[in-house]
Amino acid sequence: MQQQRQIITHPGFSRPDRTIWVVLAIWAAVIAAVAVLLWIENEMGDSNSGVYLVPWILLCGTVVLSPSAYLFYKNKFDLFHPLVFAAWSYVFPAFVVGGIIIALDFANPFFMSHVEDPKTNIPYSLLLVSIGFAGMIVGFALPVGRFLGEKIVNLLPKWEWEPTKLWGPGFLLMFMGIGVNIIGLIRGIMGYQKLEEVGIFDSLLYFLLTILTVGTILVWLGIFYAKERTPIFYIVVAAAVAFIPLRMALLGSRSGLMISVMPIMMAYLYAGRKLTVRSSLVLGTIAVLAVGIGVIYGTSFRNIKGSEARVEAGEYAAQVGATIDYLTGEDPIEILGSSLQALSDRIENLSSLAVVVSNYERLAPFEASYGLENNIVNDALTSFVPRFVWPDKPNTSDARAYSDLYFNFGENSFAISPFGDLLRNFGPIGVPLGMLIVGLYLRVIYSALIDSGSPAMWKKAAYFPLLTVISYESFYAIIFPSLIRTLAVLAVSMILVNILVRGIRRSPRS
């Protein structure tokens, strides 16, 4: 029984003793190919080559992928295990693949000129990521995280929801979420737009999008758990699929389609489906297509819109139509070329971190004038007071101010990552210690919501927003305030769904 329970909780590969060697062989081939390509690309060790990055890339890749390899070997591999999700959704592509992109000179952003002594600061950046991720692993492995998670389990509601009863409440949340998205577009706080002035309810609107994610997971859990293929079932599937391009169109983001697909993938796996080699290939293909299509659409949308200037909702919707017309009428080769370059630039965030690593000590005296000094502590202290209660609450983690100070370009929001934010606030020692706290938090939510026997349906739906509240390309400072707001929205959403599900149960009797 315990073994069966683990299969449900941790969707693992079958025959791990065979496939682990396949994975190791592939990794060996990849490492060898990278080394050879770097050597050839840079003319057999030329002084300007990127070969110096190879050992640091391998170190970072080894640390970041070690939890995935361990869980895979133990037949407990789970794409949405906190350490696996962190590795594959951001850290590995941004820093390991990003390191390869820099080494091969596939991307050369203008701000690389801000990195003094790249041969020192870029490897140091990879070392900080390695140490930070190792700290997160240690935090996750500490027994206190599991202990706290198990204690929290006893305090949580014992709601049991029948999967087919989730479609109505789930769609209600999805429609409410789309409504919030539309209001956000009108206000200029969502989509490809720049907010000129923060309103007292803007943060609340942004976090209300959590209900769209929860609704999506509930609907798809109901779909994947369904045992009968009735006409209603196919109507539900068609309606749920229709929401995917709608959200991508509204966001105008390169990651918009992947944001829509990830909750569906989680619902599939957490509905008790085995992660076999075949299903892994299917999910991997879907993920690659989602990234590719999202990058093509997002890049074209941004090029057509031209800037992040706020526009009226009708004009924003017209940009969606113009983007579709462009994609259907333009030369596919030209579209693919520009999209591949955009994808390379989007994936690679090692250079952004290197700018912080190279300049944080020199720019520290100027951070106060930009509202960035001690932003982690300041955000934590002010997070309990909503902006509608304190309208003049300082916005300490200002991405535009950060971009202006570190990149001399305040018209964009450059990635900083928790590693860079911790370095700015507390120095090198703050990176592993701060990420240890993140690992501890991830262990608590995983133990309380997923790794607890047979998790209830509502726990699976609540887990994903709490997992993704950790943004690995943004400020460490926003994690705690975001967690408080997400918990509040989740509590209201789950209570509403429970009331609706109980009402659906009673309706046949009345």
Image (spheres, grey):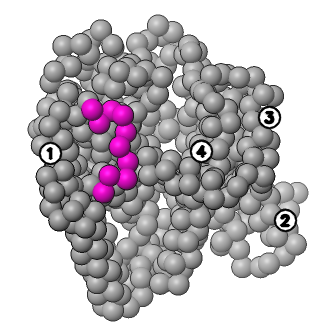
- Residue behind mark 3: 318
Residue at point 38% right, 91% down?
Answer: 15
Counting residues from the start of the chain, the first of labels 3 and 2 encountered is 2
Q: Main secondary structure of the magenta part?
A: loop
The image position of residue 458, as x and y in percent, is: 57, 56
Real-space Cα separation, disc 4 to disc 3, in angstroms: 16 Å
- Circle 4 sits in a helix, a strand or a loop, which is it? helix
- Residue behind mark 2: 235
Q: Is residue 141 left or right of residue 193?
A: left
Mark nearest the camera among 2 and 4 is 4
Counting residues from the start of the chain, the first of labels 1 and 3 encountered is 1
Asked if 418 appears above or below 239 in the picture, the reply is above
Answer yes or no: is residue 417 visible.
Answer: no
Callout 2 amino acid? Ile
Counting residues from the start of the chain, the first of labels 1 and 2 encountered is 1
- Residue behind mark 1: 119
Asked if 376 appears above or below 67 in the picture, the reply is above
Q: Are marks 2 and 4 in contact (CB under 8 Å)?
A: no
Mark nearest the camera among 3 and 2 is 3
Q: Are marks 4 and 1 in contact (CB under 8 Å)?
A: no
The image quarter in which residue 231 lies: bottom right
- Circle 3 sits in a helix, a strand or a loop, which is it? helix
Question: Which of the labelled discs sits on residue 184, or is there none?
Answer: none
Residue at point 56% right, 76% down?
Answer: 282
